[in-house]
Amino acid sequence: MQFFFEALIGGLLSGVMYSLVALGFVLIYKASGVFNFAQGAMVYFAALTVVGLMGHGMPLPVAIVLAFGAMVLLGLATERFVLRKLVGQPPISLFMATIGLAFFIEGLAPMLWGDAVRPIELGIQDEPIPWLLERFDIVVSRFDLVASGIAAVLVAVLAIFFQKTRIGRALRAVADDHQAALSIGIPLERIWAIVWAVAGFVALVAGLLWGSRNGVQFALTFTALKALPVLVLGGFDSVAGAIVGGLIIGASEKLAEIYLPPLMQAGFGGNFGGIEGWFPYVLALLFLLVRPEGLFGEKHIDRV
């Protein structure tokens, strides 16, 4: 039973990290209806900018501040030169534009800072928490707990920001109806610029946490793929859905990785390794058949 709780807690902590990545998608989708395929590239660019600046002798806090400025500029430039030009175009055009943006960022980042795999040391040790180990004999990584705490605080702050502030209310109005928001004087371009800048900041935090765990490398771009099952379960336009979906995916992925291979091997024989890589997508596919809009997504009814 202790092993089960250990796996469950580890999965939930990883799920909070997935929620952080998914949040970047939700922010932009809520404001503009655009699925930002470049979010993973933004995570890579942010982390690589930090280690690149540190490689030029800058301390970590200064590098983070400058990288934040770079991500804000990237978000503003994306809104100004990509999104604004495509207002009123079909959604597929906007989606294809973000794919092109992803390839551009993936090429720009190593051109500026190099493509070598480099670590980020945030001062958080990846070691078991002593009191949990001694009292309950449960191994929980200190890094996972702190990183998940940082991600949870950021998600909570952004949720409050969207619910309680004037800009947050304007964002929700824009998300509901662009034309109606414009008609009552809400500056659409300004709201989009703010959202892209915030998404850049979220990408920076995600890049620091995932880069500290796995090293800063091109594989960080694939963190976006980890967020897809989270979005399917939680809903593409829900901050709460990103949180709940991340927890479900993180926990189910970890438990499936541990408990499914022996069951499948006993029933079918053969080797069933690597389940954690595809199980979240199978779960998301099954969930699509039952509730396509996600747990917290807006339900659409087509009338014929």
Image (cartoon, rainbow, N blue to C red):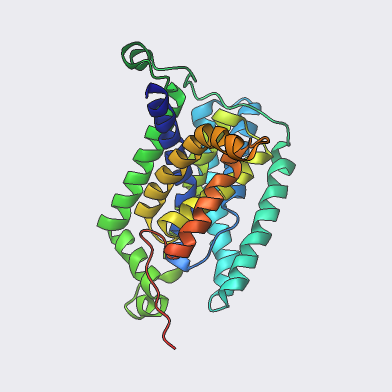
Locate residue 112, reporting x and y percent. 71, 41
Is residue 196 visible to us here?
no
Q: Quadrant of the C terminus?
A: bottom left
> Closer to the camera, 74 or 173?
173
User: Which residue ends up furthest to the bottom in the rendered image?
Assistant: 304
Image quadrant holding the N terminus, namely top left
In percent of width and height, residue 238 lies at 38, 58
- The picture quadrant where one finds residue 87 is bottom right
| Residue at far left of view | 164
In the image, taking residue 115 as reference, residue 232 lies left or right, namely left
Q: Between residues 263 and 252, which one lies in front from this camera angle?
A: 263
Q: Residue at x 30, y 63 (%)?
A: 169
Q: Quadrant of residue 290?
A: bottom left
Q: Quick check: can you spot residue 213?
A: yes
| Number of on-image labels | 0
Which residue lies at the image location 61% right of the left edge and 61% below the top edge?
Answer: 98
Q: Residue 15, position in %: x, y?
A: 44, 40
